[in-house]
Image (cartoon, rainbow, N blue to C red):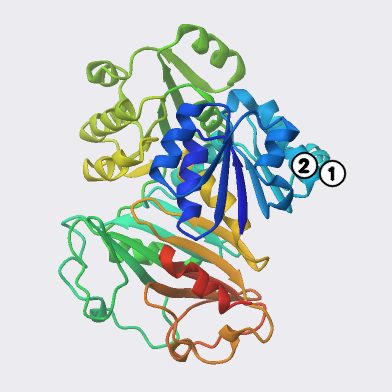
Amino acid sequence: MKIVIAGAGEVGSHLAKMLSEGYHDITIIDDSEERLAFVSESMDVVTVHGNPTSIEVMRAAGTDKADLFVAVFPAKDQDVNIVCAILAKQMGAKKVTARINNAEYLDAGNKTMFTQMGIDLLFYPEKIAADEILTLLNQSDVSEYMDFAKGKLQLVVFRLNESSPVVNKPLGDFKYPEGELPFRTVAISRGDETIIPTRDTLFKKGDLLFVITRQEAVKDLMAMTGKPYVEVKRLTILGGGRIGAAVAKEFEKEAEFVKIIEIDKARCENLSETLNRTLVINGDGRNSDFLYEEDVKTCDAFVAVTSSSETNILACVAAKKMGVAKTIAEVENIEYIRLAEEMGVDSVINKKVITAGRIFRFTFNSKVRIVKVLNGTDAEVIEYIANPDSPVTKAPIRDLHFPEGVVIGGIVRGNEARIAVGNTCIQAYDRVAVFALPHTLKKVEKFFV
C-alpha cells in the first residue's frame, strides 16, 4: 500500500514507524528539514520537504497514487491538515484522514460536510484520549479495555499482583467445558516479551494479562484474578488542558464530586466558566504536599493529564501511596510507558498509540471494523467480519494453521458471543476478535478475504 503522511511530528513519526513494519511504501511531507532528518534516520521512508498545501509538493510525494493520505500536523495547524486532505482527495488519493482540534467538527451533521469534501476520517487525538479515560473510569478494575460488537465481547487488560490467586499456577489449571469458556487469556506481557500462552504457561506476579471475555463474565474474571471492583464516584484530575476539561465535562454529569487542579490561573478562570459541577483549584500538582492538602486520598480515582509525562507519572505514584484506588496517567514519551506501569500506575494513556490504531484500520481490507494498538505489548487487536467462502470459514480453528503469534479470542454471531476454542467453526459474517503480533498481520488478513 502506498501511504503519504503530511506531518513528521510525534503522531506522524509514530504512525510511520508502525506502518513501516507492515512493508508499506511510505512518504512523509514536512516543512521542517530537522524533523524529516530525524524520521529518515530511524525508519525506511521517503521524505519530501515542503508545505503540503502546495500542489507541487503534493505531486512530488506521489499523492495522486496514494492508497491512504494522512494529515497529522500538530493541533495548531488544523487548517493545513484540512486543506491538504481535501487536495489529496481531489488529486486521486483513495482514502484520506485529517487531524483536527475542534470537537465541533465531529458533530454528526458537520462530519457529513467534511465527508462530502472528500475526507474519510477526522480524528481529534485529545478527544480520543478523553474517551479512553472515561471508558477506563467506568471499568475501573482494568488497565485497558476494548469492546467488540457493541460490548458482546470485551478485551480486558490487567496486571497480576502478589495476592492474585492465579499467580504461580499454569493456565491449564482452570478447567471449563470445551465450547463454554467464559473468558480466554490470549496473551501475557512479561518484561519486554509478549507470550502467547499454552496450557503449561505459568502466571507470574507482575504479568500483564490480555483476556477476551463475554460481557456477563467480566466480574467473575476479576474475582478469579483477585482484582477489586471500584465504582468511581469521586475524581481528581491533574491538568486542565483539553483532555482534562473533556473528562471533567462528561464525568461531572453523574459523579458525586469532580476536581481539577491546574497550575495556570487564566486557564482556571476559563474552566470555572465552562464546567458546571467541577471544583477548579489553582495549584502545582507536582508538589505531593499540595496533593495531600487537597485531600486526594478521599477520591476513588486520580487522572494526571498535564503536558509533562514525568509529572503525570510521579503524581499518580504519589496519589497511589495516599490510597487512591485507580490512577491514570497520560504518558506521551513511549519509553516511559513500561516505567509508569512498573511504578504502579494503573492505566497509561498515549495519544500517539490510540490515534495510530484508529488510522491503522485504513490499511486493512473493508472487513476490518476495529483496530486497537495496545500499551504494554507490540500486538494489535482486530475485529474482522468473515467473508462468505473465505479460508477462515472452511475448517475448525485448530485445523486452519494460523501463524504463530495469532490467537482467535472469540466470535459474535448475531446476538450470541462465544469464546473461541479449537473446535470452533467460524461462519460467514461472524465478527471475529483476533489478537496478533505485527509480523503476522498480512498473513492473518488472507484468512478473511
Q: Which residue is mark 2?
A: 108
- Picture coordinates of residue 269 (x, y %)? 53, 9
Name above or below for residue 153 compared with residue 378.
below
Quadrant containing the N terminus is bottom right
Quadrant containing the C terminus is bottom right
- Picture coordinates of residue 407 (x, y %)? 42, 74
Disc 2 residue crowd, few under 14, some 14–19, many 20+, Cα 10 Å: few
Q: Nearer the viewer, mark 2 or mark 1?
A: 1
Badge 2 amino acid: Ala
Distance (Cα) linking label 2 and label 1 = 13 Å
Q: How many marks?
A: 2
Q: Is residue 257 visible?
A: no
Residue depicted at 42% across the width and 14% down the height = 281
Residue 30 falls in which quadrant of the image?
Answer: top right
The mark found on residue 116 in the picture is 1
- Picture coordinates of residue 212 (x, y %)? 43, 68
Residue depicted at 63% across the width and 83% down the height = 390
